[in-house]
Amino acid sequence: MTKSSAPGKIILFGEHAVVYGHPALAVPVTQVHADVEVLEASRPGIWIEAPDVDLQSELNTLPSDHPIASVVHNFLFISRLSPFPNLAIKIDSTIPVASGLGSGAAVTVALTRALSAHIHYSMTNEEVNAFAYEIEKLYHGTPSGIDNTVVTYTRPVYFVKGQPMETFRVGQPFTIVIGDTGISAPTKESVGDVRKLWEVAQQKWEDVFDQVGKIAEQARKTIENGKWEMLGELMNKNHSLLQEMTVSSPELDQLVQAARNAGALGSKLSGGGRGGNMMALVEPERAESVAFSLKEAGAKQTIVTQVL
């Protein structure tokens, strides 16, 4: 049996503005993860079991564009393995699906590593990352590459569209609480709505995106210098700008305010918006009480994570 795991991820700063050439910061969330086991099957074929998405099928009975099937098909293609082995693949994930936490990228990375280890097909981190990015493109059109990079390297990432991705160090660990609205909201829709606003008044929105970009730049310096307490104010400013972009929602705003009322140093939505997750910067001793307040305010799930 061969096993592999990959973490979730969350965007700290720079949502939406990143599409227009401004920086974004994202970090791994190791408290949630995708876990994959690969072993020899006693029956012919490649059998896939993923209880979280109610899947139990042989590979060739799945549509070729099925997210998990496409990973296996593409991996078998690049590995040039012939004949194909009889395999049993089991996938478990604690990462909420379609909530901005990188569920798809985590499954791809964990599955790719488990398969490569099982058949002794060596892949570097760079090769795993490039492969995962190609899979992301199948489902997100023009993804930023943030998800697969954070998940592959399990490192904080600083990303500017069209430039090489940079990882960066955390001067002092800090704690965030993530609250899930339980509302699935496709990123493609909110990105499209922001694009419509931009098309009508480009200069106005370029100014807004520029402000978001400057917040992301300042946040990186703050994190590297270990002055994490200062991130709270930056989160609050970033959230206000995301509200201006119309990508927040009453549910997100309610959780953001509940976190602040409970003593968080700052809070904001994370990801595409209109649903999905928000996050709050907290002093470690306040993490559980803030998480409790978020649940009281309607969060379907909370995750306390330390950024290292």
Image (cartoon, helix red, strand yellow):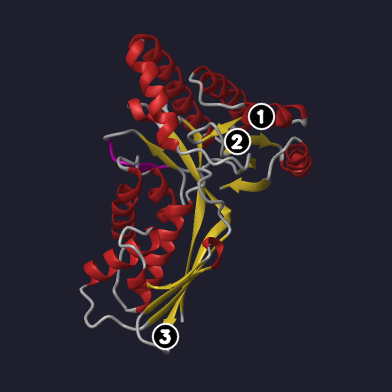
Instruction: Check disc 1 and report the residue beneath it.
Output: 256
Bin the neighbour count of mark 3 within 10 Å (Cα to Cα): few under 14, some 14-19, many 20 and up.
some
Quadrant of the rendered structure where residue 274 is? Answer: top right
Disc 2 designates what residue? 278
Compared with 153, 244 (above or below) is: above
- Of label 1 and label 3, which has the lower sequence position? 3
Horizontal and vertical percent position of residue 306 = 62, 47
Asked if 136 appears above or below 128 in the picture, the reply is above
- Disc 1 to disc 3, C-alpha distance: 48 Å
Q: Residue at x 44, y 27 (%)?
A: 217
- Image check: 226 left or right of 169? right
The residue at the point 53 percent across, 23 percent down is 238
Q: Which mark is residue 41?
A: 3
Task: Give the residue type at disc 1.
Answer: Val
At mark 1, the secondary structure is helix
Q: For residue 293, which quarter of the picture? A: top right
Camera-side mark, 2 or 3: 3
Q: Is residue 264 magenta?
A: no
